[in-house]
Amino acid sequence: MTYPVPWIKIPVRTALAIWYQWTTRTELPELSKVSVLMRQRNKVENTLRAMQHAGPGTLQVISDFDMTLSRFAHHGKRAPTTHNILDHRLLIDEDCACNMRKLLKIYYPIEIDPSLTSEQKIPLMVEWWTKVHHLLIQQKIQRDMLAQAVQESGVILREGYEVFFDRLAELQVPLLIFSAGVGDILEEVVRQSQVFHPNVHVISNYMDFDANGVLRGFKGPLIHTFNKREGALLLAAPLPELRERPNVLLLGDSLGDLAMADGVARPHNLLTVGFLNDQVEERAESYVEAFDIVLVKDESMEVPNALLKFITSGKDAK
């Protein structure tokens, strides 16, 4: 049996829980938006108060990038991801672009298929991105063309991103961006958006260029949507800026993003926010069960900004 809430269908147990959220007052009116789903509002509010009491000096933010900090869609059209930005004639030819789009049509439905387990998806994700990287290496991409490709790509961060990045920088709260995309492109997007502050750290797939600035491979182990736990333990845990910050605000758009906080030593409080961008009816139940807060087709940073403002409005905040 299902009930519509508000434009999706989810099981009655979750529907009743969400209805309770709407009928309960909160210190954060943004959490009462119809696009916000929560299974345990009391838990969310208790976690927020604990994080606020501990102060911004104990906080770190861990976020995915593509379709989390960047928009999923804009003006009714899909917005580009870091891999999509590489689909530019400055960088690759039409045959390569065609082959990459074919791979997307094959593997993206697998990535978001709620009927498959992460274990079933992992080898296919490795297969997908290994093929894509092989295609890109064959194109002999020039490093000095990346900035122009980003500038002409139409990529756009979520509305309100400046407030989010600038507030974190002001309070010297580390922002760890953990992405299965292309790190060189990601950094250029953030840089051109004028928010690449000193507190921003990026873990991603980085291109390896030769002495002439021509792509010859990719550095390190492949990072994909479903192996972020391994990346967190190997790459994020050693960062000294994060060691004494046991409170975590995590943002993602995939269930695999929940593993990004696994590198945090002895976490005290963890609040997870999931952007549900696509296939809402099929994935709503699993997202509500997994994330503390789910944002349905919300292309803004309004809720994360409200959470951040509340958490950092306590002691030691500027």
Image: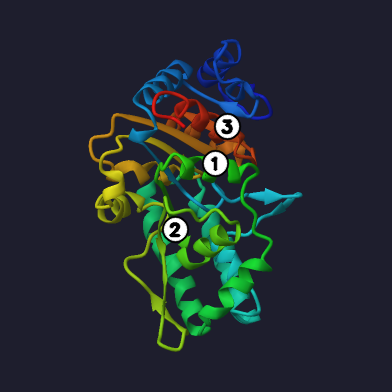
| Farthest right residue in view | 75
In the rendered structure, which amino acid carries the disc numbered 3?
Val
Q: Residue at x 23, y 35 (%)?
A: 266
Residue at 49%, 84% in the rendered image: 138
Tag 3–tag 1 contact (CB < 8 Å) = no
Dot 1 amino acid type:
Phe
Q: Name the N-terminal-most of marks 3 and 1.
A: 1
User: Is disc 2 placed on a helix, strand or loop?
Assistant: strand
| Drawn side of residue 300 relative to residue 259, left or right | right
Q: Locate residue 12, reporting x and y percent.
A: 55, 18
Q: Which quadrant is the N terminus positioned in? A: top right
Mark linked to residue 180? 2
Image side of residue 124 versus residue 281, left or right: left
Identify the amino acid type marked 2. Ala
The Cα atoms of the two marked residues, 3 and 1, are separated by 10 Å
Residue drawn where x is 51% and y is 79% of the image: 143
- Would you say 247 lies left or right of 146 here? left
**Label 3 – label 2 distance at C-alpha:** 24 Å
* Secondary structure beneath label 1: helix
Total number of numbered labels?
3
Q: Position of residue 37 (x, y in %)?
A: 56, 26
Which is more toward the observer, 88 or 120?
88
Image quadrant of residue 54? top left
Residue at the disc numbered 3: 303
Q: Identify the residue under disc 1.
A: 164
In primary-sequence order, the first of circles 3 and 2 is 2
Give 296 or 189, whichever is nearer the viewer: 189
Tell me which residue sits at (58%, 51%) in the image: 70
